[in-house]
Amino acid sequence: MEDKKVGMIDMDEVIVDKRSLKVANDYLGTNYTLDNIKGFYIQNIIPKEQQEDFWDFFFSKNVYDYAEILPNAYEVMEELMGV
């Protein structure tokens, strides 16, 4: 039996990006970009009075449906795996 290589890669901001921002934009009906975000947390763009509803909305979604694969992610994974 041939040995099979297995690799584990952190996805968030490593091979995918902007998923939380896209969910926030979907919730708010906006088109914010990362340039509009002040601080570390994207949820800071959500008004305080909407935070609870936002988190209900956020957790009802599969945030990876909103993810963008970063440029060269496939090539980097292939190189790491020696493909």
Image: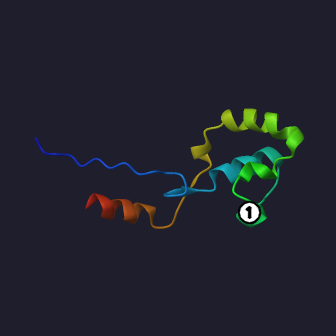
Residue 10: x and y, percent? Answer: 46, 51
Using a 10 Å C-alpha cutoff, classify the residue at mark 1 as few (fewer than 14 neighbours), some (14 to 19) or many (20 or more). few
The percent position of residue 17, horizontal first and vertical second, equals 58, 57
Q: Quadrant of the C terminus?
A: bottom left
In the displayed orientation, state which residue is furthest to the front.
39
Q: Amino acid at mark 1?
A: Thr
Residue 57, above or below 25:
above
Residue furthest to the left in view is 1
The residue closer to the viewer here, 20 or 31, is 20
Whether residue 71 sits left or right of residue 19 in the image: it is left
Q: Quadrant of residue 76?
A: bottom left
Residue at label 1? Answer: 33
Element under disc 1: loop
Residue 69 in view (yes/no) = yes
Q: How is the image coloured?
A: rainbow
Q: Residue at x 81, y 34 (%)?
A: 53
Quarter of the image for residue 40 reads: bottom right
Q: Is residue 65 left or right of residue 42?
A: left
